[in-house]
């Protein structure tokens, strides 16, 4: 439990307190919001204007890229302009590859961010064999390179973020620890130990990844390793890097950031969206406000020891029951129990479309697997890919019991034994789990549990039950009802409440109950995709843009999405500059990376296959590359029609 004070109740991790200009950060202070400019750092007035918009939207720190000495020098002009305009918000210099720029920036701004993967190391994707002695020689070299910055920060009172990124781990770290959360943590610890040797502790740490699962595991492991090494409990900067845009960006960010906030981890948050930076702070604030000052602890039994490993992914073993559980992908249940009269056109919201002219049903990639109609029997024939679940009382009197599936509750679940059923559901609130029910489930090979939480912050609620039923083989559907939520709030909070469970390996299905059926259905599939448990659509790993970006990232992302959004399961990285690619798109199948003005490099995995492609032709070249690999599928006329319906 060294990374989390309580698995059942919110308890914020106690940390060092870090001073960043006039701003304090750490467990004695509120969780801070920050973001990063996207304007060219050499555009002084543009950077000042954008920084002001960010501050007015809620940013308490503003980060600005300094890829070379000239940008680092211009930070002084930006800082002076902001101070003259009456804004004292601390500035953070974002440094990659250039120690001389970091050393200059540390004398100007209140904080510098360095990436251990590229501050003193190179990344050529080479495997290097090290002896203990040769590895120590490398550590000595890094110390010599990094030490001047540490001394400058200490002299000037400048704070530092040691920011490890999953995708930019050095060849040295990858060769020794692999492409793992452990490698991310060890990369940061090397730099931290140098700082501590110099009695410099004004430090914040981050462990970012575009994969929420990797990100969560890395932060947890970091906290445990700091305690094991008897190092100081440094504040944590939380963020999912290259989260993307719109719904996908909000789901990924919430799954990673929200899950860690539930653990009591996190002292500053940056939500990385492929949108203008002033739109990021309000999203971060919504996530934080669930825990500030306290989410309100509810009556949950304390977990003394987790039965599962929270540092690596392993799906809970369950029996295969019908089309649920076992090795099968998690299923999506659409909740229509609040609809009194379900019509054919209502099923559009859950990915099933009736086409009158050919008189047939069609389904898109987000077609729900089950529809829960409650007591409201559907009076038309459902498509083959959709099964109806009815409350037991309605099912008991239904003429077609064979093709309908009954749902029992805490009061009548024992009736299931008398009906000789092949498959049935038992819907239980988390607080209703008792020894009789556990015994029933243990002896039933046909039951599927729909586990519903009524608590506002559901993740710890589910975690307590997960630990309790871990050894049972019963498949579990995670269920949560959201009433009077905006679409964005629904995305943010459901991704935290339910997504964190799938990161931990819990859940064979998902049911999100909300007024907006379309958003709830898309969100359910989005959560499963972000957790890497069910791939139902093309995934885009796109950076949020910054002053290094060499093309219009939002426009390009939209263009690539329009041409490729039918390629189910393929992951495409869209990176504004070479800093964020190919490393940051570590698990992408293909990459589109800016390398110069209107010049793009295309990647297959982490290997560059086409260099200096003109940006006007780059999207077509990307499609040709996918075609060469035999992974291209022409969009069908039916799919194009479904987009218009």
Image (tube, rainbow, N blue to C red):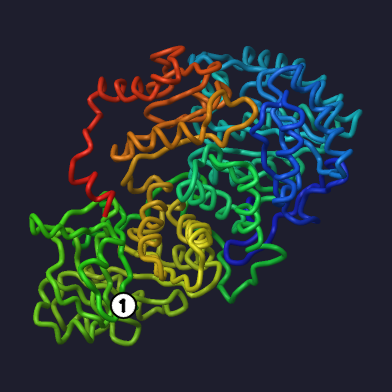
Binning the other alpha carbons within 10 Å of mark 1 as few (below 14), some (14 to 19) or many (20 upward) gives some
Q: Is residue 489 left or right of residue 375?
A: right
Quarter holding the N terminus? Answer: bottom right
Is residue 227 something that shows in the picture? no
**Number of on-image labels:** 1
Quarter holding the C terminus? Answer: bottom left
Residue 49 in which image quadrant: top right
Q: Position of residue 317 (x, y in %)?
A: 33, 55
Task: Name the residue: 28% across, 51% down.
Answer: 644
Task: Name the residue: 42% across, 16% down.
Answer: 608
Task: Name the residue: 12% across, 77% down.
Answer: 401
Question: Toward the viewer: 151 or 158?
Answer: 158
Question: Which residue is under mark 1?
Answer: 339
Question: Toward the viewer: 91 or 535?
Answer: 91
Task: Name the residue: 64% across, 13% down.
Answer: 133
Q: Position of residue 66 (x, y in %)?
A: 71, 24
Q: Position of residue 175 (x, y in %)?
A: 51, 20
Residue 426 in which image quadrant: bottom left
Q: Position of residue 37 (x, y in %)?
A: 67, 36
- Residue 68 higher or lower than 322, as above or below: above
Residue 423 in which image quadrant: bottom left
- Residue 568 higher or lower than 523, as above or below: above
- Residue 28 higher or lower than 79, as above or below: below
SS type, badge 1: loop
Q: Residue furthest right?
A: 155
Is residue 153 something that shows in the picture? yes
Q: Is residue 188 left or right of residue 256?
A: right
């Amino acid at each position: 439990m060294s990374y989390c004070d309580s698995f059942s109740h919110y308890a914020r991790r106690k940390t060092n307190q870090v001073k960043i200009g006039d701003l304090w950060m750490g467990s004695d202070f509120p969780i801070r919001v920050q973001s990063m400019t996207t304007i060219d750092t050499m555009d002084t007035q543009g950077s000042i204007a954008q920084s002001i918009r960010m501050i007015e939207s809620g940013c308490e720190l503003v980060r600005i890229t300094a890829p070379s000495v000239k940008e680092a020098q211009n930070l002084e002009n930006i800082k002076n302009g902001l101070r003259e305009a009456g804004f004292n918000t601390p500035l953070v210099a974002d440094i990659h590859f250039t120690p001389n720029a970091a050393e200059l920036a540390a004398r100007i701004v209140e904080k510098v961010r360095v990436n251990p993967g590229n501050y003193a190391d190179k990344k050529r994707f080479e495997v290097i064999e090290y002896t203990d002695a040769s590895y120590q020689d490398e550590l000595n070299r890094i110390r010599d390179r990094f030490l001047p910055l540490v001394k400058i920060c200490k002299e000037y009172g400048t704070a530092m973020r040691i920011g490890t990124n999953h995708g930019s781990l050095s060849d040295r770290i990858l060769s020794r620890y692999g492409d793992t959360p452990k490698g991310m943590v060890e990369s940061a610890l090397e730099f931290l130990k140098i700082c501590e040797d110099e009695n410099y502790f004004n430090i914040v740490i981050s462990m970012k990844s575009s994969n929420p699962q990797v990100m969560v595991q890395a932060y947890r492991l970091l906290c445990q390793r700091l305690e094991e090494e008897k190092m100081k409990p440094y504040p944590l900067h939380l963020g999912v890097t290259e989260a993307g845009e719109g719904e996908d960006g909000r789901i990924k960010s919430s799954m990673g950031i929200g899950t860690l906030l539930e653990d009591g981890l996190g002292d500053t948050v940056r939500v990385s969206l492929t949108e203008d930076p002033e739109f990021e702070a309000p999203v971060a604030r919504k996530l934080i406000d669930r825990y500030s000052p306290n989410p309100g602890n509810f009556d949950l039994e304390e977990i003394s020891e987790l039965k599962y490993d929270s540092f690596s992914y392993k799906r809970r073993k369950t029996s295969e029951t019908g089309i649920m559980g076992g090795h099968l992908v998690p299923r999506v249940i659409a909740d229509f129990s609040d609809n009194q009269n379900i019509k054919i056109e209502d099923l559009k919201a859950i990915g099933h479309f009736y086409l009158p002219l050919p008189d047939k049903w069609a389904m898109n990639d987000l077609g729900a697997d089950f529809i829960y109609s409650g007591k409201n029997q559907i009076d038309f024939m459902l498509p083959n890919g959709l099964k109806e679940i009815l409350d037991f009382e309605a099912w008991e009197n239904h003429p077609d019991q064979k093709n309908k599936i009954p749902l029992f509750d805490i009061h009548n679940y024992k009736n299931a034994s008398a009906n000789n059923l092949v498959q049935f559901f038992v819907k239980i609130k988390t607080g209703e789990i008792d020894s009789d029910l556990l015994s029933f489930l243990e002896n039933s090979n046909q039951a599927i549990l729909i586990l519903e939480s009524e608590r506002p912050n559901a993740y710890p609620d589910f975690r307590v039950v997960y630990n309790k039923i871990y050894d049972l083989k019963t498949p579990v559907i995670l269920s949560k009802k959201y009433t009077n939520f905006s679409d964005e709030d629904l995305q943010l909070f459901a991704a935290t409440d339910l997504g964190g469970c799938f990161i931990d390996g819990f859940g064979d299905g998902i049911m999100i109950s909300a007024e907006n059926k379309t958003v709830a259905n898309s969100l359910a599939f989005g959560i499963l995709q972000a957790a890497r448990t069910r791939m139902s659509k093309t995934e885009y790993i796109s950076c949020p843009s910054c002053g290094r970006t060499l093309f219009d990232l939002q426009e390009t992302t939209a263009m690539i999405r329009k041409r490729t959004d039918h390629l189910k399961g393929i992951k495409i990285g869209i990176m504004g500059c070479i800093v964020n690619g190919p490393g940051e798109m570590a698990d992408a199948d293909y990459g589109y990376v800016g390398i110069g003005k209107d010049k793009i490099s295309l990647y297959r995995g982490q290997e560059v296959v086409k260099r200096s492609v003109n940006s006007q032709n780059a999207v077509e070249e990307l499609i040709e590359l996918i075609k060469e690999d035999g992974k291209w599928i022409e969009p069908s006329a039916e799919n194009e029609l479904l987009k218009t319906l």
